[in-house]
Amino acid sequence: MSGIQGDQLAIWLAAVVAFGNFAFTIVGVCLVERMGRRKLLLSSLAGVFFSLFLLGGAFYMAKRNDASISVHETAPSYMKNSCPSSGFCLDCLEDKCGFCFVKDATNNPVSGSCVPFNSSSDHSAAYGRCSQKDNSTTWSYEACPYKYAWLAIVALILYIAAFAPGMGPMPWTINSEIYPLWARSTGNAFATATNWTCNLVISMTFLTLTESITRFGAFWLYGGISFCGWVFFFIYVPETKGKSLEELEHLFL
């Protein structure tokens, strides 16, 4: 969807994301006593809000600059073509077909067609221009050609850089400090249950949400929720750095 093509590139990008998550978590550990819990939490959530809107913008740009299907390739009489003959590259890939196109002088995709995979390999088309090795055409079956793919990568890196130091560890740190002793176990139990329930809800609804309000709409929705969370934290979450348990108990009296 965002224009990342190739299994090896996708694997390396996933490895970079995982390493970035680890590295920025260490940064959060180093900053927590210097900045304080509240400042680190608010700055982290502000970065999450910004990066989610940027990520939504990357998917919006991908949708707006999607290559169109302008060429219809006739299928052999013995083969059924279930791929769309009009529309855009994303429509083609969502129907489990491949996109065959030619690059113009500015490297933009033109003369695109939607063709089924070869039955023996998805690295070539079942028929038409991309059914044989030809340097004049390009076969895309994993992602649509998109020259702004770097924008989605930058947004994802910014998200990891913002989330890992603050929103990742800080809620658990604050949870361990903010409750009075008599409510600590119950409060942490409810916090853990809420966290994993929200994870489950997002996992179960993400694909349906992207179909209902588009991919960029889903990320903008998450960004809006992050903004509401930032306002809530700004108003209600106190600073717990350097405070004793007795002082913390008086914060909510």
Image (spheres, helix red, strand yellow):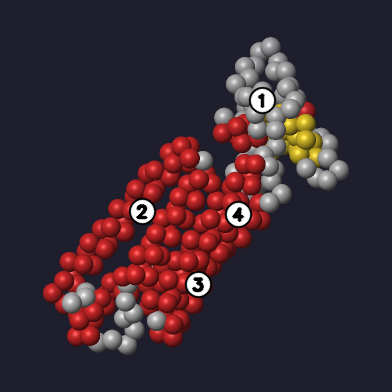
Mark earlier in primary sequence (3, 2): 3
The reply to whether discs 1 and 2 touch (Cβ–Cβ < 8 Å) is: no
Mark 2 crowdedness (10 Å alpha carbons): few <14, some 14-19, many ≥20: few
Which amino acid, by three-letter code, is at mark 1? Answer: Ser
**Which residue is identified by label 2?**
199
Mark earlier in primary sequence (4, 2): 4
Mark 1 crowdedness (10 Å alpha carbons): few <14, some 14-19, many ≥20: some
Mark earlier in primary sequence (1, 2): 1
Point 33% across, 53% down: residue: 198
Point 36% across, 53% down: residue: 199
Mark earlier in primary sequence (4, 3): 3
**Residues at marks 1 and 3, CA–CA distance in whole angstroms:** 45 Å
**Which residue is identified by label 4?**
152
Quadrant in the picture for residue 136: top right
Disc number placed over residue 66 in the picture, else none: none
Q: Is residue 181 left or right of residue 166?
A: left
**Which residue is identified by label 3?**
24
The local secondary structure at tag 3 comes to helix
The answer to whether residue 208 of the structure is visible from this angle is yes
Instruction: Give the x, y percent position of residue 118.
Output: 66, 28
155 and 26: which is toward the camera: 155
